[in-house]
Image: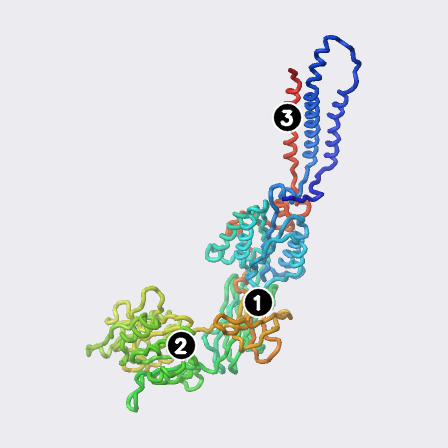
Amino acid sequence: MLVMMPILAFGFLTPWLFAAGAAATSIPIIIHLLNKRKFRVIVWAAMDFLLAAQRRNARKLKFRRWLLLAVRCLALLILAAGVAQLLLSNAVVGGMLGGQRTIIVVWDDSYSMAWQKPGTPSAFDRSKRLLGDLLAGLPAGDTAMVIHASRGGPVAGNKPSPDHVTLKAAVDAAQASDAGTDLAGALDQAAETLKDLENTTSSRQVVVLTDLSRSSLAGAQKGEGSGERLKKSVAAVQKLATALRVIDLGSDEQANMGVAEIRAQRPVVVAGTPTEFRITVVNATDHPQIDTQLTVSLDGVIVHTEKLGKIEPGNSHNVLASVTAPTAGLHLLEAKLPADLLPTDDARRLMIDVQREVPVLLVDGSPGDNRTLGSTTYLAVAYSLSAEGKTGGTIFSPKTITELELDKTPLPGYAAVVLSDVGSPTKRVAEDLKKYVEEGGLLIIFPGGRTNAAMMDEALGDGGAKLLPATFGQLIKVEHPEQVGEGVTFNPEGFTHPVLQKFGEAYQAGLQVGFTNVQTQQYLKLGVPKDGSVETILRYTSKQAGAAGDAAVVTRPAGKGRVVQFASSADATWNTFGPKPSFLPFLHELMYYALPRQPDVLTLGVGEKINLPADVASPGAWTAPRKERISVTTTIEKDGRARLTSGALTAAGVYSPAAGSGAPVIAVNPDADEIDIRHVKGAAFAAATGLEARDIVVGNSELKMVNSESGTSGANTDTSIGRWLILAALGFFLVETVLARVFSVYR
């Protein structure tokens, strides 16, 4: 392999010293010439024998003289170069050592880097300048690679390149992302690249440009989860790189307030009905924040304002905002704080798909007649009334059918299906229920007098559709006359379960919530698995129920949906729960808790991609934040369904089709984990990531300090070998002394 070396491969720190030393090499040459001056020849018979011997050794003597002259001159020349501090280009050194030099820059372009104090450049602007200077100063023989450290930043196929001009142009055109920091992911990509270069490069240097924000550590300080991953990523790079430096571009003044979450308290939002939304605000400053104003708007119209009171440093504050969407359909909800020095996370958005109602299908296994009530009578009344027990204002729309009608009724149109006192579902019904639940439906099961426990377990349990959270066991009865009036009561266990929290608040206020006076004369003992996969919402408590209390209501997710299973009936044949005032609010709270939240494909995070059914909007150009546009295309999935897809979304804000009205809007939010941008000291950052404190470079000469140690640009890309040259010169003088002594002995 032919290696082309640059013409200017070396230089001198003090060239005049080298010039003086080079001139000194003339001394042994002059001495050599003086020794060759002419003498008057006197013929002497005794010298004839010596002259004959000298002629025989003339070649050997001439070679020795020239060798001594060369050694003396070379020793002086090397000594002069050493004293003058000869500098060699690192690219040349790398070539002589058998490989190139590679610089890998991990560039934190997350939105915390955009924090900017008035009158000063942001950390991102400084990093951009430093990175541009680095790339501009790299020698032609070096390769470089820039890895973006924002979440989703690392790109597969990105490789080190010798084209520094193109890399610098890309850096100059870059903007700070609205995504969070993913240092671990970027370092993992750097480690993969270093593995490929290990045998082909002599120098592999990694430089990390970041603001050392708390968000960049992502749990590393606690030593858990992503923190351990970050430590492993740093260790992998240290093992493969010849140098690793972190340049701290942050400021101790970094502080921020941001909206971390906006979420509906109920899984379904119904038009015309007030819905509470929980909004979380984070104080990522070192000082208490008092009376920060939060503004909530629906489709651009302000619907709620509130002063948040006092929020302690590093704490979050939750707000419950009641919002009423006037019509069904898609609506944009936005929570916003006053603008600060990092505006990216001052607002958070949520697309809500408002429904007209929540349809509930009640399947009555014993419908009753004119003289008796059906098993779903109390259920139908409870879902037809509002939470306050009034007609109208309810979000539920119940429909009652018989068990015989179940196999002919399409289930996907209902948010919940309730089975009450059904006998044993047929195989077809069991399969329909399984598909319905796994695709996101809610199934609630009440037993009754017609329920055959063994057949229900066979149809819906582990032997069949695998839907039941627990097995239906033996029937527990209160049979003694003196116990009939007592029955089995509920044990709310401190009202700690989310379904019971509102009842617990009323109980703490001294109100009668009704659970403790509900009497149950019969129930099926539920065999609840002990592996923790099933939640117990409510238990019984009595002598018959045992010390721990049998489960009364249990639930378990199944696929995208959920199943709730009761131990006793929904009517008044086995218990007195139905006629009690607590029955209605309990069913409502249970429904709110158990209804699965549908995947929110209209509210995304930065870095995610649009993925919608093809029939909801048109492909082509979509408007995006910052007055930009993105391309949305139609793709066909393996199952043949067409979807609208896009590339990763890089900016927070609202996206919508450029043409067409009534098309869906996509709300994109920044990473909530990035809100805490408070600066971490270099020593703390080093301890949390497994680095040495000296690996964290701080100050105005960040890049120069790295260059002076690792040789990355400008004059510092040259390596001085003066010390080694002086040692070599001394070695040559020693060799000259030995040779002169050996050559002076004639045989």
What distance separates the C-alpha of mark 3 from that of mark 1?
70 Å
Which residue is labeled 2 in the image? 591
What distance separates the C-alpha of mark 3 from that of mark 2?
96 Å
Asked which secondary structure carries label 3, the reply is helix
What distance separates the C-alpha of mark 1 from that of mark 2?
37 Å
Q: Amino acid at mark 2?
A: Met
Q: How dense is the environment of label 3, judged by Cα within 10 Å: few (below 14), some, or many (20 and up)?
A: some
Residue 69 in the image: above or below residue 582: above
Q: Amino acid at mark 1?
A: Gly
Residue 646 % position (x, y): 57, 69
Which residue is labeled 3 in the image? 735
Q: How dense is the environment of label 2, judged by Cα within 10 Å: few (below 14), some, or many (20 and up)?
A: many
- Asked if the residue under mark 2 is in contact with the one under mark 3, i.e. CB atoms within 8 Å, the reply is no
Q: Nearer the viewer, residue 469 or 258?
A: 469
Q: Which mark is residue 647?
A: 1
Asked which secondary structure carries label 1, the reply is loop
Q: How dense is the environment of label 1, judged by Cα within 10 Å: few (below 14), some, or many (20 and up)?
A: some
Residue 592 seen in this snapshot = yes
